[in-house]
Amino acid sequence: MKIAQLRGLSLGGGTSLSLPMLLISMRTFIALIVVVLFFSITTPNFLTPSTLIILAKHVAINAFMAIGMTFVILTGGIDLSVGSIVGLAGMVAGGLIDVGIPINALGVTIYPNVVETVAMTLAAGMVIGGLNGVLVTKLNVAPFIATLGTLYIARGAALLISNGQTFANLVGTPAYGNTGFPFLGSGTIFGVPFSILALVVMTAVAGYIATQTSFGRQVYAVGGNENAARLSGVRIARIKIAVYVISGLCAAFAGLVVSSELVASNPASGESFELNAIAATVLGGTSLMGGRGTIGGTVVGAFVIGVLSDGLVMMGVNAFWQMVIKGVVIITAVVLDQVQRKMQRQMALQAQLASA
């Protein structure tokens, strides 16, 4: 084979991708393969069906939030409130199941069924997300500061709902017609855990929205060049509010699954979950500058984080070292993203010079 053939890989249409560029663009898949191979060799029973199912359920929690986070970061924003929304969602669901909705004026208490409980909980997450969007677009608050503030608001609201107490044994009461909540976290459909099926469906729907709809194209346009998108007629504020609402919805769903799996809700649930969501999104190839990234890449990134976390636990690695390793992985992902951007600019410049 000639040396010239080794320098580039044809992608069709006359486009050539260098081997280093190809490897960097596929870094998330390569990282997933590497960590799976590493733990399968070093950790007994890592690849057993039961371990893989548990791993996938753990990954699903982070992936739910990371999918919503992807839409936000694609517009050039950030959402630090998702972890607190997880805790708030669990407390809302727990309160509706255990306490219901007291109507003191009539001396009655309404106990919503599971479907209504899920709907109201998701709505609560969307409200927090909408608040984030309004703060960012209408009041011009920086996304970092706006979502940092709502992080505290949502966490405080979660604590206020039960005065800091835990709602335990969320199985419902048959007489009230509110049973069935544990199914979200431990139920199965055709032998497959519900949370894993939910992840597949959410990934497919989010991927379709991002790539096949005008809304998705506008999200990428806003992150790529906000001024150009505005001149093209894109309603910037509407798009940004929508992505924060989506993020709140996804985080609330994650909170429902967590509380359902534990059959209990604690106001401290979800602490630092936002870091895993951001890590999965960035590791999956979504640029923090906005305008570039995929839902599929984010889910693969969530699997990398999940395999790394569970594998280190199975190996008995100290929890402090686990945090250090995760930090190194995140920094590496950001550095590689910058390298990819630089290489893409160089390739574009070379293409312009060649066509001149």
Image (spheres, rainbow, N blue to C red):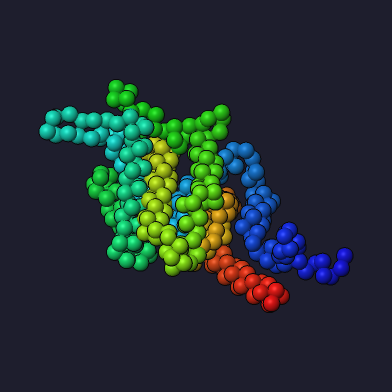
List x then y, in percent, for residue 127: 31, 49
Q: How many marks?
A: 0
Extreme residue toward the left, this view: 105
Image quadrant assignment for residue 265: top left
Above or below — where is 75 with respect to 50? Answer: below
> For this rendering, which residue is in front, 176 or 348?
348
- Residue at (72%, 60%) from the top-left corner? 13
Q: Quadrant of the C terminus?
A: bottom right
**In percent of the image, x 65 and y 59: which residue is there?**
26
Residue 112 placement (x, y as % from top left): 29, 31
Whether residue 294 sits left or right of residue 228 in the image: it is right
Q: Residue at x 25, y 44 (%)?
A: 162
The residue lying furthest to the right in this view is: 1
Kindly tell me whether residue 113 is visible in this rendering: yes
Quick check: can you spot residue 282? Answer: no
Q: Residue furthest top?
A: 175
Viewer-proximal residue among 119 and 189: 119
Q: Could you say where residue 315 lies in the image, as x and y percent from the top left? A: 59, 52
> Does residue 223 appear to the left or right of 129 in the view shown?
right
| Quadrant of the image occupied by residue 12 | bottom right
Residue 94 x, y percent position in the rendering? 32, 38
Is the N terminus in the top left, top right, bottom left or bottom right quadrant? bottom right
Task: Compare residues 224 and 288 and report the one nearer the observer.
Answer: 224
The residue positioned 32% from the left and 25% from the top of the image is 177
